[in-house]
Image: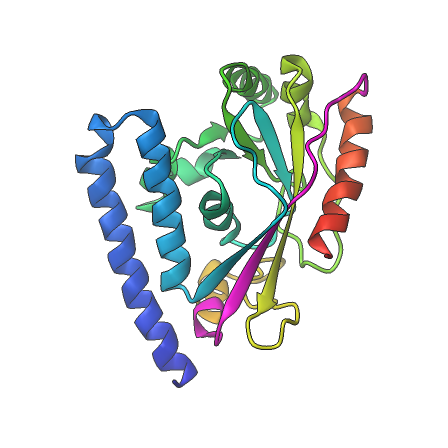
Amino acid sequence: MPRALRACWRVLRLVLHALLGLWTVALHFPRLPPDQQQARVQAWSLGLLACAGVTLELRGSPPQGGPVLLVANHLSWLDIPVMHAARYCRFISKSDVQGWPIVGTLATAAGTLYIERASRRDALRMVASMRDALLAGEVLAVFPEGTTGDGRQLLPFHANLLQAAVAADAPVQPVGLRFLDSSSGATSFAPSFVGDETLLGSIWRTLSAPGITAVVHFGAIEHAQGRDRRAWSQALHAAVDGLRQR
């Protein structure tokens, strides 16, 4: 199939899938218990990947339950649905996302916690909210790089969000994300969204690709064991760096 035709077909499927998600959120979510809402989010995310021509490959063992904080590298706009498809979790995201058409509604329904990055006070509030969620036995997820990388080198981690796991005495599980060309097995940079790239350009490039495999590699669960957030962040950086290259 020609690349442009393939991309247009996938765009149509994604639009219909997004509308189905909005319909489900509006009509069904208010009547569903949390576990069924989470199952719907995971199933919808798997469907989104299928619409985009992305196959999910799991390595390692996802957490069976919380409390746990997932710490992953950040490559693409696809990372959140890929993580949701692998294992439902609540993401921490910048507050701007909440106001995005369609995306904001779906993200909020998926349990996203929002943070105003420029506000120190809001950062403290977010740490407290994350701590409370972990104490309640939830599965949270963060991208400590703070932005998307190019996949060639892992950016430094910001340690501040790890404070919630320290405060709640909750475990952290490192996760390595990687995108592969489904045919050759080589690293695919089609879904990348970094630097001067536009979101629409990244989406179009992804949807034009013949086939992509999203690899989610779950590492061993870790505990702080007396480490502060900075020391723990350095150890987790090394763990994620290893997982994303395997």
Which residue is drawn at the image coordinates 73% and 57% (left, top)?
Answer: 245
* Residue 188 visible in image: yes
- Give the residue at the far bottom of this rendering: 2
Please tell me whether residue 51 is drawn above or below residue 172 in the rendered image. below
Q: Which residues are magenta?
A: 206-227
The outermost residue toward the left is 27
Residue 217 lies within the magenta run: yes
Left of 123 or right of it: where is 103?
left
Q: Where's the N terminus, which quadrant?
A: bottom left
Residue 9 relative to residue 186: left or right:
left
Instruction: Give the residue at x 75% y 22%.
Output: 224
Please give the count of numbered marks on the rendered protein: 0
Between 68 and 7, which is closer to the camera in this rendering? Answer: 68
Give x and y (percent) for residue 206.
48, 67
In the rendered structure, does residue 178 fall within the stretch colored magenta? no
Q: Position of residue 94 (x, y in %)?
A: 51, 36
- Taking the spot 59% from the left edge, 56% from the top edge, the residue there is 215
Q: Nearer the viewer, residue 135 or 200?
A: 135
- x then y, percent, for residue 44: 34, 48
For residue 246, which quarter of the picture? Answer: bottom right
